[in-house]
Amino acid sequence: MGEGGSRLGNASRTALSEGGDLARNIAAFAPRTAQQDLAAAIADAFDSRGVLLAEAGTGTGKTFAYLVPAILSGLKTIISTGTRALQDQLYHRDLPRVRDALGIGVKTALLKGRANYLCHYRLEQAKGEGRFHSREMAGQFQRIVAWAGRTRMGDLAELEALPDDSPLLPMVTSTADNCLGGECPFFADCFVVQARQRAQAADVVVVNHHLLLADLALKQEGFGEILPGAQAFVIDEAHQLPELAAQFFGEALSARPLVELARDALAECKQAPGALAVLQEPARALEQSVRGLRAAMDELPVRGTRSRAAEDGTVEAALDTLLESLRTLHAALLPLREAAPGFDSCTARAKEFEQRLLRWREPAGDDDAGFDDPDIDRPVDAADASSTDPDPDAAADDRGPLASDDDASVLWYELTARGFRLSRTPLDVAGPLARHRARSQAAWVFTSATLAIGGRFEHYAIKLGLREPRTLLAPSPFDWPRQALCYLPRGLPEPSARDYTQAIVDAVRPVLDASGGRAFVLFASHRALREAAALLRDPVDPAPWPLFVQGEAPRPVLLERFRASGNGVLLGAASFREGVDVAGDALSVVVIDKLPFAAPDDPVFEARLEAIRRSGGNPFRDEQLPQAVIALKQGAGRLIRSETDRGVLVLCDPRLLGKQYGKVFMDSLPPLPRTRRIEDVDAFFAPESAPAAATEA
């Protein structure tokens, strides 16, 4: 790479410049220097098969910045994003526009997880079962059968009337556990296999983080790696990756797959005379033991550690019963393995679930005196925890800040309305991520609007197992002094005060009066959200704007109603901080009630903090503070979404100015002008303060 940049870097910069391919062929496109710098840096990473960690502020246009070098490079590129909705938008809207503008005929593919594709075998099994609880459900099943006869892709998204949580979905899709792989009689027509073949033949493949991580963790049994030969990876919304990776590099046992195993074993009996007499009782006993365990856990907190569950004798007895029922079913299945295609799979699943349950109940390494928490499982030959470097500014080791505890994991459970999940989650994913990256020998680009803490990238570099990566901060092109204002109300009590939410509502009402509603009010807890909703609905002095409260309707419905109202006030919690895009006048105020420090009741988070403490680090500085900064940046990022947006960010927490760490939060936000005077907010929203024309990017 010479001083002028690589050939690919120069070509990418030119395509995104004034008079370039995108400006000529995409009507709304406006050239941006930050976008060109980002594209050139990504191109350089592609050329050198290097690693880039890049924060691209809102409005940079990061999607085009990575699509241009991906298409121009000719490299086999995997682009991974956070959700299926973003995946569909990227594949169906952004990618075709950039490809057509550049005039390059690259082959593209969209690849989703196996749960999105119809499984012929399970559909056939479901036809004779009569497990439909209502006439409506039976009618929906018939629509799936009719569609199955004509679909080419088998993507269940084609069935718009089918809800995401339909109980029919697990009946007509496969999982890694129950897929028969090459033994399946429908293997030649398998939609999952076909989708993966298309992905393997494409130049640019769009996946999501769940699928990418499942592939890296090799959890797609029967298929091996699904993304072999990739020469470049672009990870968008990269701030989500460490938390998701912890799920995939761990393991879990939950209620639904156990019940499905019992039902699948009985469904196979149709093809094997005499099998029903052998399997009916063991399968029924397994279902009963799953229900029995959930009932026994009813008195436990919704989330807790393995040792917390062990304190309850009823729960331990129910776990014994579940283990025994898995062993009994496995023994009954063993002689039947050759009798029908699915029996072999059911036998393997029963054994695997038994092993997972044993690993969750009897962790190895408990005798290690250096790591005496019974809920943290650690290999006995791991290095002494005190040997890690406590210096937060030390260069990131390839294996992360918990290098010695690379394989340590926490054992915990979580309850849902009718089910449970028993999980083993690694405390640190830097090691496995670094090993997978090294094995790939590809370029890796990690990008997001929120990666840096006070302009520095150490926190995410360490979490991702990156050793001195190249970094880039591409600033937002917005005219912050003209488009935005940050208001920090005076006189608020400490967030721990009992009347804090009342004080927030009192401080925010004058802002909403000035803006005429049009606001998101985001809360750190659901309790505070409900309290604020009650205060704003006070019959004596009700708020004059339509209120939309999280939990009172599904998230997409709330957002649609909010946009349509024109002057609504939406009260939301953590899920509204991220991935919500409301451009224009409908959203002109974002209020954040308090600094979004993670709740201390999460067993994995607690264990991670404890491991940092043991290794000589500082849990607050090394984990709690960086996580809260990223969450605040995500929430603040909802406010200004385009060059013509205007709005006020209201930060209520007095710790921002009263505590030394408040400066880290303020330094991580865009350069908004700040005020403590409500008069400045009134002036911002006064008619004469509106800009005469849109600002040039």
Image (tube, helix red, strand yellow):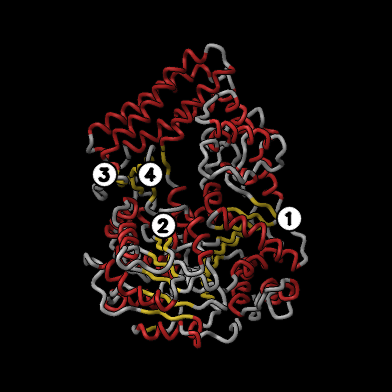
Q: Residues within 10 Å of mark 2 (few under 14, many from 20)?
A: many
How many angstroms separate mark 4 from mark 3 (CA)? 13 Å
> Cα distance, mark 3 to mark 1?
51 Å
**Disc ID at residue 550:** 2
Q: Position of residue 531 (x, y in %)?
A: 30, 60
**Residue on which disc 4 sits:** 424
Q: Quadrant of residue 100?
A: bottom right
Identity of the amino acid at label 1?
Lys
Callout 4–callout 1 Cβ contact below 8 Å: no
Q: Quadrant of the N terminus?
A: bottom right
Quarter-of-image position of residue 669? bottom left
Q: Is residue 563 positioned above or below 661 on the image?
A: above
Between the C-alphas of marks 1 and 2, the distance is 41 Å
Q: Is residue 404 above or below residue 521?
A: above
Instruction: Locate residue 195 relative to residue 383 in the image: left or right.
Output: right
Image position, residue 412 (x, y; %):
33, 44
- Answer yes or no: is residue 598 visible: no
> Upstream in the sequence, badge 3 or badge 1?
1
Picture disc at residue 107: 1
